[in-house]
Amino acid sequence: MKAPVLAAAFILVISLGTGNVLAQTGQTLCQSLEATSSLEFRKSSGVGPRGTSRAQTPDFAEDEGGNAAALNDIGVDHVNGHNVARNLTAAFNCFFISARQSQMEAQFNLGIMYATGRGVKQNYQTAAAWFKKAADQGDTEAQYILGAMCESGCGFQQNYASAVKWYLLAAAKWYLPAQEGLARIYSAGLAIPPTPVEALRWHHLASVHPPAEAAYLLGMEYNKGKGMAPDKVAAAVWLRVAATQGHVAAAFHLGALYDIRTVISSNPAEAIKWYLFAATNGHAQAQYALGVLYSAPGTDVKDLVQAYAWLDYAARQGVEHAEEKRDSLEKEMTRPQFYAAQRLKRDMLQIKGILPRQAP
């Protein structure tokens, strides 16, 4: 148990240390778009079983394209070789006809083809144009990709204000990479918030506080609705700006925004990431929250050994209910789990600052 916990903490510190570094250059981003396997061709939403399709042929005339959504699905089948021979040219034809009928997923798929050079000559500008058509229809991933392309100058002239515009649209739907993009730009001072009220407030706080503290204060104002309407997305962005600069309290509150108790933005893995950073730096409430999250039933992150250990550290710092919660876990734990938790507690003492005199 020792290695995973300490390694996770070490990796997290390394990632936080690079959090405010600017994104890749335009050429590097373009190359990563070309090489990435994370861009997946998508079938149309809400159109029948995905495993079914019409008779498939690469010879289409636009006037006989029929259902644009079904045609897009045929294109995806041609890409994947599903129920038909793999044929990227046929896939491109399907996507193109469907996209010209304003099928959002087909527009996105064309963006992938032009960005990666699959089935067509690579052209980042044309890829950006098709991603924009999908983004204008509300496609979240396309909005994020446009933001990244604007930020890095891939397919567009580098423009941080435009990157912020597209990132905001995706971030509002809790698309995590877009929130990371906004935090990266704000941290580096490459653009200001687009709304005058937010920009003025940020300018004021940054003029009287260190950058991380200013971002934390602004994030908490949005989180609690202090002096402005509550905005959890804006809170997440600004708390991330602070947390990536090592602000412990910001990391705790950022983790709370992704906890399983938050229905809209629930992301247990992201919550654990930020709770872990705060907890290993001695934040008592983060230690308790981490223990509760690890002990939550019906989740992929349930780990009674970790839960017991973190609740024990929270109890040592006097967090209310931590001792009671820790002791109740013993009834669920096997004997090997209990002994593993005891060993883990000892191993965790190697993490400097895990038990400060007073939690931040």
Image (cartoon, rainbow, N blue to C red):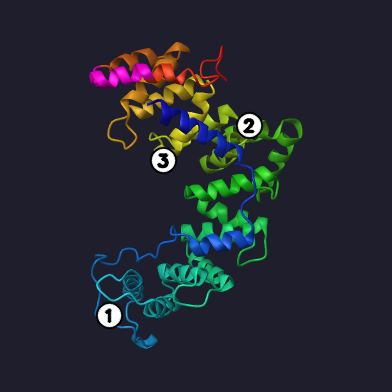
The picture quadrant where one finds residue 251 is top right
Amino acid carrying label 2: it is Leu
- The image shows residue 13 at horizontal and vertical percentages of 55, 33
From the image, state whether disc 1 or disc 2 is nearer to you: 1
At x 52% / y 43%, what residue is drawn? 233
Amino acid carrying label 1: it is Gln
Q: In the rendered structure, which disc, 1 or 3, sits on the residue that comes first in sequence? A: 1
Tell me the distance, in whole angstroms, between the alpha carbons under discs 2 and 3: 23 Å
Amino acid carrying label 3: it is Asn
Residue beneath disc 3: 267
Residue beneath disc 1: 56
Residue beneath disc 2: 217
Q: Is residue 218 left or right of residue 333?
A: right
At x 27% / y 16%, what residue is drawn? 330
Q: Is residue 334 magenta?
A: yes
Q: Secondary structure at mark 3?
A: loop
Tags 1 and 3 touching, CB below 8 Å: no
- The image shows residue 341 at horizontal and vertical percentages of 34, 20
The picture quadrant where one finds residue 47 is bottom left
Q: Is residue 256 visible?
A: no
Q: Which residue is farthest front?
A: 3
Q: Is residue 199 left or right of residue 51?
A: right
